[in-house]
Structure formats: C-alpha cells, structure tokens
Image: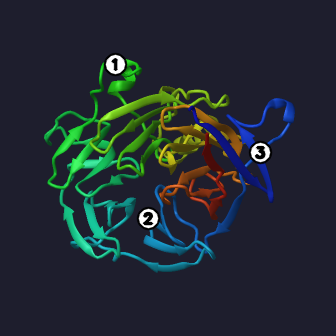
Amino acid sequence: MRHALRVVVVCAGVALLCAGVLASPADKVEPSCAARPVSLESPAYMIVDAVVRGDRLLLPDYTKGLREVDLRTGKDLRSVLPMGTQQGEVSGPQHLGCGSGRCVVFGDRYFWVYYDSSFRFLHEYPGMKSVTSGQPLVFPDRMVIYGIASPDVSGGGTPYLFIQYDDGEIVPLQEYPASMPVTETVKRIHFQGITTGGLAALPDGGWAFVDPRSYAVFVFDKNDRLTKAWRGTNPRFRAPNWGASPEVHDDSGRQRYSQWQLAQPLVKRPVPLGDDLLAFVVGIPDGPLLQRHELDIYKTNGEPVAVGLPIEGVRAGRLIIADAGAGRLVLVGQQTWEPSTTTTVWQVELPTVESTQ
C-alpha cells in the first residue's frame, strides 16, 4: 500500500497534526519550528563552516584557529588545533569537514590536513591540487568537494563538484545518465556559494548536493552514482541571477555584494532527517541585510512533505547549516554579512515525521 505521511510540528508547546504536505487551508493553521538561540561569548570573525558533535560546536575561525564551543553556554572550551605553518598545524582555517572517524581542515596554506576524531594529526597534502569553496564531505577513502581542481591533476579540467581520493586522485562529476530529467547545463555545471548550497552525507552512505541557483537537488548513492534529480518547490524561491552580482574589489564592493545577495532567496546545504527525508533551510529577504528563514522537507525522491515552515526567531545576514548529524538542525548566524559583533547558534526543534499504512 502507498504510505501516507503524518507530520508533527512542535511549536510553543502545541503539537499540530498534519496530513500530506500540511494542514489544509481551511484549518487556518500556521505551523512553524521553534529555535533556541545561544550567543557565543566570543564572536567569530566570519562564519563559513561548523561541525556539531554532542554539545560541542567546532568552528573554524580564520583569526582564532579551530575553536571548540559549548553549545549550552556559548563559551569557548579550547582551541582545538595548534596555529602555525609546520606539519599538522593550521594557519587561518577556512573549511572543516568530519566523517568516518576523521576530520579534514583546509587552511590558508592551501593544505588539506587530516586528523582523527580526537584531532590527533594523521597526514596532510602539501601544495595546492584542489581548493574547496564549501564544507567537504569526508568518507573513509575519499572526500566529495565543491571547488576547483588544478588542470594538471588526474581528471583534468576545472570541475566544480568532484571526488578527491586519499591517494590524491581527483575524479570530476560532470557526466550524468542521459535518462536523468536534468537540463544539459545543470548536468555539466554546478554552483555553490560561501553560505548557500552544498553537500550532505546520507545515512545509507550516499550523499546529496543542492545548487542554490535553481534549488536543484542531486542525490548520489554510496558509489557516487547519481540516482535522483529534482527541484525544490518553495513558492517564495526565485532563482537568483548570479551573473548580475556586483564584483568585489574593495570594502565598498563587498557591501554592495552583501546587499545584493541578501535581497535574493538563498537555499542552504541539505539536512538529512532519516533514511528517506531531506530538509532545506531557505533564506527569504526580510529588510536591509537580513533574512528570515523557512524549512522545507522532501522525500529523497523529491516528493514534498512540508514546505515553507517558518523557523521562528531566526533572522540573520549570514547563516550557515552546521554539520550536526542526521535528524538534527543547528544554525550559526551573524546579524550582518560583514564581520559581526555577535555570533548566534540556534538549535531548531525539527518536525517528527512518521510513515503509516
């Protein structure tokens, strides 16, 4: 029999039972998701990536190293890694990915530095074979990266989305089966902004990528083969014209770019909610240099489950999704796009989704 989905959205202590996408319009119910904020005692210079493990937030801070923060209080616990330019040290950490019992840091030496889950040094790649523009996915034998690979590495060209194996081999992901319902342009070219789009590991060993230009979602299996492709259906999403974005050459250009970007709907990296569900946070323009945020939930085949759930109280100019594990949504944001005087972490109470006969 076909499964029906029942969504329980918890908000302000009230449980709202919904069927299908949500309650019918006649019910006049406005469900939303509650979020609990904690301000960091020491604001981050600029947030790009974050990883959550238990009650700890691991935050690469370009000026302070890799910070470990208590999620309950916002207080710094320690600086996880030594700062410097020697082997195993990180100067200016920019990106952090953790998975399969290890963590990888990309810093301003353009080194990939590998550590175990306790941040004991394992090895590093010297030189610049590849550069990531977002949080990498870390698997036992490889990483999935959105970024740039040097033309002389294995695979050639300059792929935007690629696999980097532990032996250094790089395999671009640009060819998809002709039967997939994806336009030729999207098949060949992906896009990810600093705080938009991105990757997420799935419980079955596969992974998903969302392109924020079009809200196109690509689902891959554990062998890095594309299995599904579809688009998000949030009615407030309008594809940004990234080709019209202002150039950034100085502080005034950065200000213009910030104003332009935050006037566009912004889709964040995927959040797995279980074996067959993906959630996405969508930023909606809400005043100068600010966005409010909504939550969309889909089956991995693209069928909508809940679309446009407001995330109450989460307004920010710069917002990222922390890698917090399946079924957990942790947001890290700053009030302004530029380096801010405050950094806030929100733990969002997610809907409970059940399958019934």
Dot 1 surroundings within 10 Å: few (below 14), some, or many (20 or more)?
Answer: few
**Which residue is depicted at the point 56% across and 44% down?**
279
Dot 2 surroundings within 10 Å: few (below 14), some, or many (20 or more)?
Answer: many
Measured Cα–Cα span from mark 2 to mark 1: 40 Å
Q: Find numbered disc 1 in the image and state the secondary structure of the residue it sits on.
A: loop
Measured Cα–Cα span from mark 1 to mark 3: 38 Å
Q: In this view, does 61 lie above or below 252?
A: below
| Residues tagged 3 and 2 counted as in contact (Cβ below 8 A) | no
Residue type at numbered disc 1:
Ser
**Which residue is depicted at the point 51% across and 59% down?**
46
Q: Name the residue carrying label 3.
A: 31
**Which residue is depicted at the point 60% across and 29% down?**
233
Q: Number of callouts in the render?
A: 3
Q: Find numbered disc 3 in the image and state the secondary structure of the residue it sits on.
A: loop
Q: Name the residue carrying label 2.
A: 60
Note whether residue 293 is visible: no
Residue type at numbered disc 3:
Pro
Q: Mark 2 or 1 closer to N-term?
A: 2
Q: Find numbered disc 2 in the image and state the secondary structure of the residue it sits on.
A: strand
Q: Is residue 185 above or below residue 96?
A: above
Q: Name the residue carrying label 1.
A: 179
- Report x, y in % for residue 76: 53, 78
Q: Mark 3 or 2 closer to N-term?
A: 3
**Which residue is depicted at the point 36% across and 52% down?**
136
| Residues tagged 2 and 1 counted as in contact (Cβ below 8 A) | no
Q: Mark 1 or 3 closer to N-term?
A: 3
Q: Is residue 283 toward the left or the right of residue 116 in the image? A: right
Measured Cα–Cα span from mark 3 to mark 2: 34 Å
